[in-house]
Image (spheres, grey):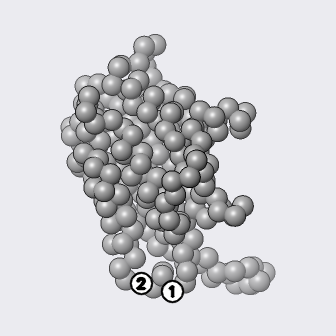
């Protein structure tokens, strides 16, 4: 797992969280790979990218960034911060549903609560877009999408690891892509990352 950091030795809490991230067992329909993490937001960071693939079709995507500041961050209300972006196509009818944004936000909150994740300072935006092609593009299909940009502070300690937050994020990806969770055999990120190089 690639991480950004200002010193050579990772703080134990961050190292433990990175271990949870790199060893997490992902749904086989979610293809996860490492990303170069940002270097300017927090002293320590790790990031992953996800593509949701069903029957060889990309039905959604997501990105998760884990930030860590050993001194804590007042705006976070803690030492860690999870930042995510997720998107998927939706039907034209769904775009006109006035409650779709509320439903999108509930996917994240319900996923965190269902998994028993302890968190605070959650915030985000839900964007619903529809594009209609004209002119030389008029033969292309109209597109409708929902995008979720959100962040929350995971409360991590000896009893609460990052794993439940990863489970919640995986549930969010399944929800936004409109696919049910599965308990089939899954592949850890470390294997996927190695096979893609």
* Residue 59 picture quarter: bottom right
Cα distance, mark 1 to mark 2? 7 Å
Disc 1 packing (10 Å; few <14; some 14–19; many ≥20): few
Point 29% across, 47% down: residue? 117
Question: Where's residue 150, x and y in %?
Answer: 37, 55
Q: Which residue is mark 2?
A: 97
State the SS at label 1. Answer: helix
Give 48 or 16, whichever is nearer the viewer. 16
For this view, does 103 lie left or right of residue 185? left
Left or right of 66, for residue 54: right
User: How far across and down, in percent of the image, does residue 94 sit?
Assistant: 48, 82
Which quadrant would residue 76 be assigned to in this image?
A: top left
Mark 1 touching mark 2, by CB under 8 A? Answer: yes
Residue 109, compared with residue 83, is above or below; it is: below
Q: Name the secondary structure under disc 2.
A: loop
Q: For the N terminus, which image quadrant?
A: top right
Which percent across, then down, holds residue 154? 29, 42
Residue on which the image places disc 1? 93
Q: Is residue 157 visible?
A: yes
Residue at horizontal 49%, vertical 60%? Answer: 181
Total numbered labels placed on residues in the image:
2
């Amino acid at each position: 797992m690639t991480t950004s950091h200002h010193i050579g030795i990772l703080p134990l809490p961050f190292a433990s969280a990175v271990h949870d991230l790199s060893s997490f067992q992902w749904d086989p329909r979610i293809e996860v790979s490492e990303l170069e993490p940002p270097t300017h937001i927090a002293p320590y960071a790790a990031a992953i990218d996800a593509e949701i693939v069903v029957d060889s079709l990309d039905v959604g995507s997501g990105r998760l960034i884990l930030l860590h500041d050993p001194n804590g961050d007042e705006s976070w209300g803690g030492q860690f911060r999870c930042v995510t972006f997720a998107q998927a196509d939706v039907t034209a009818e769904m775009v006109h549903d006035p409650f779709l944004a509320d439903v999108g936000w509930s996917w994240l909150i319900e996923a965190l609560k269902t998994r028993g994740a302890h968190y605070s300072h959650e915030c985000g935006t839900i964007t619903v877009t529809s594009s209609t092609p004209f002119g030389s593009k008029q033969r292309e299909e109209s597109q409708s999408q929902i995008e979720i940009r959100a962040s929350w502070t995971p409360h991590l300690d000896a009893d609460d690891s990052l794993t439940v937050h990863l489970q919640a994020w995986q549930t969010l990806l399944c929800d936004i892509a409109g696919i049910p969770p599965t308990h089939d055999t899954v592949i850890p990120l470390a294997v996927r990352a190695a096979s893609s190089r």
